[in-house]
Image: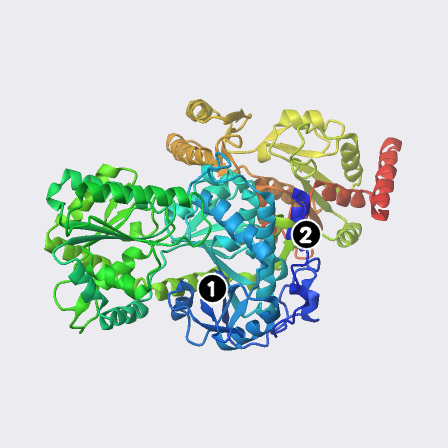
Amino acid sequence: MMSRSYTNLLDLASGNFPVMGREKERRRFPRVMTVPGNIAELDDEQANSVTSENPSSVAGDRMIIVANILPLRAKRRPDNKGWSFSWNEDSLLLRVKDGLPEDMEVLYVGSLPVDVDPIEQDDVANHILEKFKCVPAFIPPSLLANYYHGFCKKQLWPLFHYMLPFSADHGGRFDRSQWEAYVSVNKLFSQKVIEVLNPEDDFVWIHDYHLMVLPTFLRRRFVRLRMGFFLHSPFPSSEIYRSLPVREEILKALLNSDLIGFHTFDYARHFLSCCSRMLGIEYQSKRGYIGLDYYGRTIGIKIMTVGIHMGHLETVLRQADKELKVEELKRQFEGKTVLLGVDDMDIFKGINLKLLAFEQMLKEHPNWQGEAVLVQIANPARAKGIHLDELQAEIEESCNRISKEFGRPGYEPVIFVHRSLSISERMAYYSIAECVVVTAVRDGMNLTPYEYIISRQGITGAETGSNSSGPKKSMLVVSEFIGCSPSLSGAIRVNPWNVEATAEAMNESISMSETEKELRHEKHYRYVSTHDVAFWSRSFLQDMERTCAEHFRKRCWGIGLGFGFRVVALDPNFRKLSIDDIVAAYCKAKNRAILLDYDGTLMPQNLIVKTPSAEILSLLNSLCSDPKNIVFMVSGRGRESLSQWFNPCKKLGLAAEHGYFLRWPQSEEWETYGQGSDFGWMQMAEPVMKSYTEATDGSGIERKESSLVWHYQDADPVFGYSQAKEMLDHLESVLANEPVAVKSGQLIVEIKPQGVSKGVVAEKIFTSMTEKGEQADFVLCIGDDRSDEDMFELIGNAVSKNILSYNTEVFACTVGQKPSKAKYYLDDSSEVVSMLESLAEETSPAVSSDDEDHISTRRFNRLASFDD
C-alpha cells in the first residue's frame, strides 16, 4: 500500500516505488548499452544521472514513440492459446513515421489494449518487439483502475476540458492514491523506454496527458536526451489549471522536455500563462519560435494541428465503394438532406446541444420538416467517464421528443446510431452528408471535419459512389471550442451553447449556393491535403532537432529532488569556484581588487532585516586591513543606508545606486558620477509612474537620489508585465530628450542617469589602481543579479582596455547556478561568506583583538561544519 503523504510521494518520484506484481523479475529486452554495468543497475534511481558522454555504438538516429496505448489490435487465437496481433490502421501514432526520414527506425512503447496474463507476458513482449518493434508496458489491473479510469479520466480529462470539481458528484474530488498510481505508471513506462533507449542517438516523443510526468523520470537518467512531448487534449486557462493540487509537479515535469507541442495557440498560451503565474517563467519569441528559458535550457513551444493520413483514407474510400455501402446509404436517404454528427459518447462533445439546435432549426424553418435528417453517430465511451448514464438518458429523451413532434410515415428526423462503426462505414456516411456538424463544448483536436472533407473530395478517376465525377462540395458547422476550428476558415463557427445561433448556422449551411459550397470545400481540401500527419510529424522532428542543437555545446547536470528535478545547462567554462584555487591565487597576489554586491550576495534575498551582522562587518574589516587589498561594496542601495550600515568599516569603498555615488576607502566624501546632476526629469517621470501605480494593484515606486524604480513583484504577473511594457514605452517617449536611461529588469522598471552602471564602477577602480602603478593581479567580483552582469562583462573586456593584464587572476563569480557572463558560481550567500572567510584568514597584518575573536569563532564554526 503506497503512502498518501506528500513527502513520500516525492520519494516515489525519486524512484522509491513498490514492486508492481512480478515486473522486476521478468527478463528485459536487449538494449544498446551507453553506460558501464548491466541493466539491473539502472533500476537504482538513486544513482547519478547518466550524461551520455560515452560514444554511441548505433550509427543512425531512432525515434521512440511513447503513448498510453500501442498502435496494435489484439485478439485471442481461436484455440485460446496465445494472442494474435496486427497493426491498428486507424491509429494516429502508426502514421507518424510517414513524416520521418526513411532510414529512421521507429519503436513504440505503450500498453496493450487487452489484459495479458502474467504467464504470457514474456512471450507476448518478445513477439511484438520482434515483429512490430513495440515494447509493451504491462500495467497491473489494480494500478490501471486508479491510473487510467481514476486520475486520467476523472481528474485530468474533466479539468483539461474546463470542468472544476465543485462537488464529489460534479467532477470528482482530488484523490491522492490516484495521483500516486499515475506517477507509478509513468515510472513503469520510463523503465520500458530505458530498456531500449540509446540516449545519444535516439529521439523520444511522448504523447498526451496520460504521461505528463514521464519526462522527469527520463531526464533524471539522461540529461542530454532529445525528448519532445505533444498534448492532444486542450490545456485549460490558468484559472482552471491552478485548482489542480499537483499543478506545479506536472508543469515542472513537462519542462523537462525539450519541445512541448499543442494544437492551437490558445492551448499554448494557457500553458505559458501557467508557467508565468505559478513558476515565474516568461516566454520569448525569437525569429518566429516561442521558447522558455528554464535554467539555461531553452524549451521550445510548438503550435501545429495534427493532420490525417491521406493514403489510408483513400484506401478506406475504395473499400467503402467496393462494399457498396455508399450506394446503400444513398438509397436510404434518397430525397433527404443529411446533416451528420460523429462523436464519442462524452459529456464534452455537445451531442444534446446539437439535437436541440436541430430541433430549433425545424421549428424556425418548417420548410426543412420532412426533408432534413440529422444522423448522429455516437461511438461508445472509451472509458468509464463521468455522468454517462445521465448524458445518454438526456440524448434519448431529445431524440424521442423530436421524432414525436416532427416525425411522420417515411420520415424520421433524427437517426441515432449508438455503436462502433468501422472507418469504412464512417466514410460512407460522410460521403452522403450535405453538412457535418460538430458542437463539442471543448475538444483537443477532432479530426472528423478533416475526414469529411477528404471523403467528399473522393478518389480521382473513380466512377461510382461518393467518388463520381463532378464538382466537389462540403459544408461544416463547427464549434469554436475545438482544436481544428482555427484551420477551417471556410466553416461556419458557432458557440454551441447558443442553440438559436447554431440552428441558424445549420440552416445556412444547407441553404448555401452550390458555388459557395464548392469554393469553401476547395479551400479546406487544399489545407487538409497538404497539412497531413506526415507534415505534422516532420515539422515536429525538425523543431526538436533545432531545439536540442545546443545540448552538446553546454555542460548539463541535474539538480533538485522529486518533481523539483531539473537540468541546468551552462557554458562549458562555467564551474563552481574552488576555495583552494582562489586562496592559492590570493596568497600569491600583490595587488588585489575585491568587488562585492550586497543583497543576494553577502545577505540572503529572503531576509526582511538586511542590516549586516557583526560577523559580516568583522569579515569585511579583516579583508580591508590587508594593504594589498582594495575592497568595494557595489550596491544598488542608496548612499545613506550604505553609510550607516558600513560606518565601522572605514577602509571599505562604497558604490551606491549602481555607481552614481562613489566613496573611496578611508574617505568621508561621496563623489558623483553620471551625466549631470539635474534631476528635473524626475518631475516629468514620477507622475507617469504614479498613474501606472494607481492602476496596478501590488505595484509601488521607490525613489532614490539619482533614480526612480517601479516595482511590480506583488502585482498580478501577467498584468504587471503588460503594464511594465506599456510604461517603458511611455517613459521613453516622455524622457526622449533627457540624459537618462529607462530599463526593465526583474519585475522592475528603472530610470537612471545615462552612463551609470556597476561596470563603470569596476572600470574606475581598475583604472585608478593602474594609474597608481598598482595594477590588479588578483580580481574577485561577486554578484547575483542582472546589474552585476555589467561588472562581469567589463572584467571580460578589461585586458583589451589595458586596465588588467593577461596575467591577472580573475574570479568573476555569480551566486546560484544560472546563465551568466561570470565563469564561476557559488550556490548561495552562505558559501560566499565561507569563501571570504577563507581569504580573510590569509590577511597579512595584525588585526584588532575583537576581529581576531570573530575570525577564530568563524574558523571553529566552519571546521565544525566540515566535521559534520
Residue 821: x and y in percent read 58, 50
User: Can residue 670 be seen?
Assistant: yes
Residue 825: x and y in percent read 67, 49
Q: Is residue 723 above or below residue 40?
A: above
Q: Residue at x 36, y 66 (%)?
A: 534
Left or right: 85 as drawn, with respect to 673:
left
Give amino acid for label 2.
Val
Q: Nearer the viewer, mark 2 or mark 1?
A: 1
Left or right: 30 as drawn, with respect to 620:
left
Residue situated furthest front in the rendering: 409
Q: Nearer the viewer, residue 326 or 701?
A: 326
Q: Is residue 635 above or below residue 476?
A: above
Residue 45: x and y in percent read 68, 58
Res 269 label: none
Secondary structure of the residue carrying numbered label 1: helix
Q: Nearer the viewer, residue 355 or 68?
A: 355
Image-quadrant location for residue 616:
top right
Left or right: 452 as drawn, with respect to 749:
left
Q: Mark 2 near mark 1, Cβ–Cβ under 8 Å?
A: no
Image-quadrant location for residue 397:
top left
User: Can residue 812 be seen?
Assistant: no
Q: Residue at x 29, y 71 (%)?
A: 315
Q: Nearer the viewer, residue 331 or 106?
A: 331
Q: Is residue 356 above or below residue 92?
A: above
Q: Identify the residue position indicated by label 2 in the image.
A: 810
Q: Nearer the viewer, residue 401 or 424?
A: 401
Residue 208: x and y in percent read 47, 55
Q: How many marks?
A: 2
Q: Identify the residue position indicated by label 1 in the image.
A: 545
For marks 2 and 1 on the same chain, the one whose residue lies earlier in the sequence: 1
**Quick one: label 1, few (<14), some, or many (20+) residues within 10 Å?**
some
